[in-house]
Amino acid sequence: MVAIVDVGITKFGKRKESVIELAGEASKDLVRKYDFDFVIVSNSYSGEFNSISGINSLITTYLGIDEVPSVRVDNTSGSGGSALLLAKSLLESKEANTVLIIGVEKMSDKKTREVTKIISSLLPENERIASLPSLASLATINYMKKFGATRESIAEVAVKNHYNGSLNPYAHIQKAVSLQDVLSSPVISEPLRLYEYTPISDGAASIVMTRNEDALSYTSKPVYIKGIGYSNNTSFICDRDDFTTLDSVRRASRMAFKKAKIEKIDFAELHDMATILEIIQSEDIGLFPKGEGWKAVINGVTRLDGDIPLNPSGGLNSKGHPIGASGIAQALEAFWQIRNEAGNRQVKDARVGLSLSMAGFGNSATVTIYGDEP
Amino acid sequence: MVAIVDVGITKFGKRKESVIELAGEASKDLVRKYDFDFVIVSNSYSGEFNSISGINSLITTYLGIDEVPSVRVDNTSGSGGSALLLAKSLLESKEANTVLIIGVEKMSDKKTREVTKIISSLLPENERIASLPSLASLATINYMKKFGATRESIAEVAVKNHYNGSLNPYAHIQKAVSLQDVLSSPVISEPLRLYEYTPISDGAASIVMTRNEDALSYTSKPVYIKGIGYSNNTSFICDRDDFTTLDSVRRASRMAFKKAKIEKIDFAELHDMATILEIIQSEDIGLFPKGEGWKAVINGVTRLDGDIPLNPSGGLNSKGHPIGASGIAQALEAFWQIRNEAGNRQVKDARVGLSLSMAGFGNSATVTIYGDEP
């Protein structure tokens, strides 16, 4: 098995730096401290957003580690989870001993309409009439109808995650909002509103991974990866029977819990591209029975001081979602929480955490479980 | 260690099918025969060439294996080699038992000028005045001057590889050419001419990989991967001291030979994006002393019936170079050659082979050694 031994991150948000410079900012201190024998760049859209290819080699050149082999791993919004899995495999197969994963995306050079169009290119051609934000609104309508959830319960996810993000110095939107703010923000796709969606962000996050047996020579407090689960679902969204559950997330989390040989987690970073998704995912990974997740939100169970804090970092909702960086930033948050280094947003007694990195509308899901012991 | 147990391929060339359909054509028989637990798609430019993202999930959906987890691996022209390495790691770490790698690229929808511009996006911004074809011509001029190589010796690579390709039913250009044909074809970048460069091709190639201990339950004749070596070099081409050698190729091949614990190979598939590169690479992987590779060409040593046949498939030069597919198609050729199934282009007594998958101008290199025993 493998462990995370160090991390680096940029502030997420609208940044003036190039995609290469952002990757460098998150990684340069790590490159100074360690010798890497493999670099994985988690990035999806450098061609579309930045007119760059071969980004992995451009980044290692920028960092002055020209000879270190590298590759770009892409699984759209779920790239970070896939990068973790492949880094784990490279280490366990002994093809590498010290892997640097750099998640990075620079999105803000394009207009919102262009960004939405580019991301919608993951949908089959005959479904591109839809967009990921509109699929989330469809899920909201179905969820409310099927389970009697109140509109407020869904908006409360944004209130909670903006509050958490206000405590995170790397978050894009470091500002708490009220329920009233959320429900009076502009409608994006009825009934969901602006503050319920992740913003368009630039940013980078980097982690250093080694095998467990080497971890203590890097740090006295490694964070261990206890298991990774992964599964896909059809890209034909029209073929889904039910918009209130994500099959890939259910399968991936079952696999992760089984591999990690644990049943209980202390916190989770979920893929809240839209508020409703955090609720659906919290049920699909087994924290609450199906249809009950919205009640956990209004009862405060998922707040920082609740029984099972969700998205202590602020989540995609407030931290931002630079696509290739998100899954790696989740691993970073787990690293800090488990080491008790998360500052004002520290989850009490955080020893075991989970992250969900998801592509498309659950087209792919990777669930990683982290702990303070192997 | 791991083995290749089955393969699939499309004809390379200008194809009317979409990138997804090409991937399907190379893979559908394999999907019918085996249960996969991971799919790696080797592809670099689906966004730029085809306005598609999430290509891995779109392909598994198209193939009707919706739930099988997948990822896209990109290392520009060297993607295939990187995909082999990551598949090997997934298998050896037991994250997967049966991996399908699909290499695919659909390039011909764009005009030549656009294709060149897109591929040049792997160069640092201040070097984009150059292009990969012009770097090859610079290498040619330097090589001829430094080692006294004749112009004809370099063109003879195209004669040899077009002849080999004429025997390969999957090659793009299935037509032998004479030295006169090559040297009278249009100049692309002085002194190199049209027939000395790889054409712009569409195509897909797929391979099935398992761990060695499982391989015999799939086929009585697995082709074993004996070792993979990999290294990078700076993306700043101006920083290279010497255009007549590729440091990443030298390092990657030394690593591959060391891991494979062998010294001699029976054939090699090299990355002959331009004729000169086959010569330089044949020296860098240690087949000939530096500056002697051109003599081996004119002496027939690298022909199909020579001592060490190079690019028996026709190479990139005649088979074509659908970017994400090339490295996987090289593995396919090794599979067929070692199983004695390469038809009219069969290398005599081919038991151990090598492939070189290269990105940019040696920005990255992956060398894989294959054999008929583990």
Image (cartoon, coloured by chain):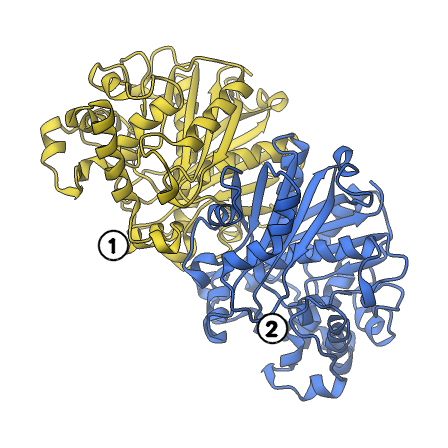
Chain colours: A blue, B yellow
Q: Position of residue B277 (x, y in %)?
A: 30, 31
Asked if one can make out residue A232 in the rendered structure from this viewpoint, the answer is no
Q: Residues within 10 Å of mark 1 (few under 14, many from 20)?
A: few
Question: SS at mark 2?
Answer: loop
Q: Amino acid at mark 1?
A: Arg
Dots 1 and 2: beta carbons under 8 Å? Answer: no
Q: Nearer the viewer, residue A150 or B366?
A: B366
Q: Nearer the viewer, residue B147 or B316?
A: B147
The residue under the point 86% across, 50% down is: A263
Marking on residue B113: 1
Q: Amino acid at mark 2?
A: Pro
Q: Position of residue B30 (x, y in %)?
A: 49, 35
Question: SS at mark 1?
Answer: helix
Residue A153 appears left or right of A316: right
| Residue wearing tag 2 | A199
Q: Position of residue A42 (x, y in %)?
A: 57, 51
Please identify the quarter of the rendering in which residue B278 is found. Answer: top left
The residue under the point 65% across, 38% down is: A98
Chain to which mark 2 belongs: A
The residue under the point 82% across, 73% down is: A297
- Image quarter (top left, top right, bottom left or bottom right) of the N terminus of chain A: top right
Q: Nearer the viewer, residue B12 or A87?
A: A87
Please identify the quarter of the rendering in which residue B1 is found. Answer: top right
Q: Residues within 10 Å of mark 2 (few under 14, many from 20)?
A: many
Q: Position of residue B248 (x, y in %)?
A: 44, 33
Residue B258 appears left or right of A276: left
Please identify the quarter of the rendering in which residue A329 is found. Answer: bottom right
The answer to whether marks 1 and 2 sit on the same chain is no
